[in-house]
Image (cartoon, rainbow, N blue to C red):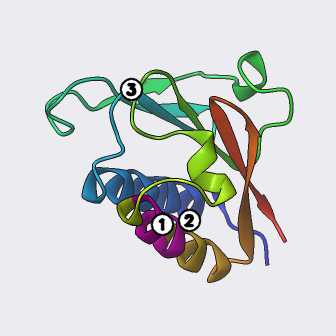
Amino acid sequence: MKLNKHQIELLAIKIMLLLIKYDLYFSCKILFNNKAICINDCDPIASLTIVYDVDPKDYILYPGIISLMHDGGDLRSDIFLGEGTENDRRFIDELETLLEEHGLFVEAKNSYTESIYYI
């Protein structure tokens, strides 16, 4: 079943909260519904910004319903390939469980982006 825009936004917020929980939020953007949640500072709540009118195709060749972009932070594409610390693995496990509940999966696209698609 396809998610509506409200459900996609709630899922993007849950992903952001997971990134904060596992301390992987620094310099991260979550793209969804032509919006972006940006976290650019050591204080994730104080630095949280929502940007509107964002076309994910300006940044990612094949964006998903939600896409993650990161540059210079602790979130790295190798985490999505099974590498990384125990903390990274717990993040991936929790993210994959959340996505599977909605019939979705995450795919690493390159060294700084991941996209979420329907199964």
Q: Position of residue 70 (x, y in %)?
A: 51, 29
The residue type indicated by label 1 comes to Arg
Which residue position is annotated with label 1? Answer: 89
Secondary structure category for the residue under label 1:
helix
The C terminus lies in which quarter of the figure?
bottom right
Which residue position is annotated with label 2? Answer: 7
The residue type indicated by label 3 comes to Ser
The residue type indicated by label 2 comes to Gln
Q: In this view, does 27 lie above or below 83?
A: above
Q: Is residue 35 above or below residue 32?
A: above
Q: Which of marks 1 and 2 is nearer the N terminus?
A: 2
* Mark 3 neighbour density, 10 Å: few (under 14) some (14–19) many (20 or more): some
- Which is more foreground, mark 3 or mark 1? 1
Magenta span of residues? 88-94
Q: Nearer the viewer, residue 42 or 99?
A: 42
Q: Which of marks 3 and 1 is nearer the N terminus?
A: 3
Q: Residue at x 63, y 61 (%)?
A: 82
Q: Which of marks 3 and 2 is nearer the N terminus?
A: 2
The N terminus lies in which quarter of the figure?
bottom right
Q: Residue at x 62, y 41 (%)?
A: 77
Q: In this view, does 76 lie above or below 100?
A: above
* Mark 2 neighbour density, 10 Å: few (under 14) some (14–19) many (20 or more): few
- Which is more foreground, mark 1 or mark 2? 1
Which residue position is annotated with label 3? Answer: 27
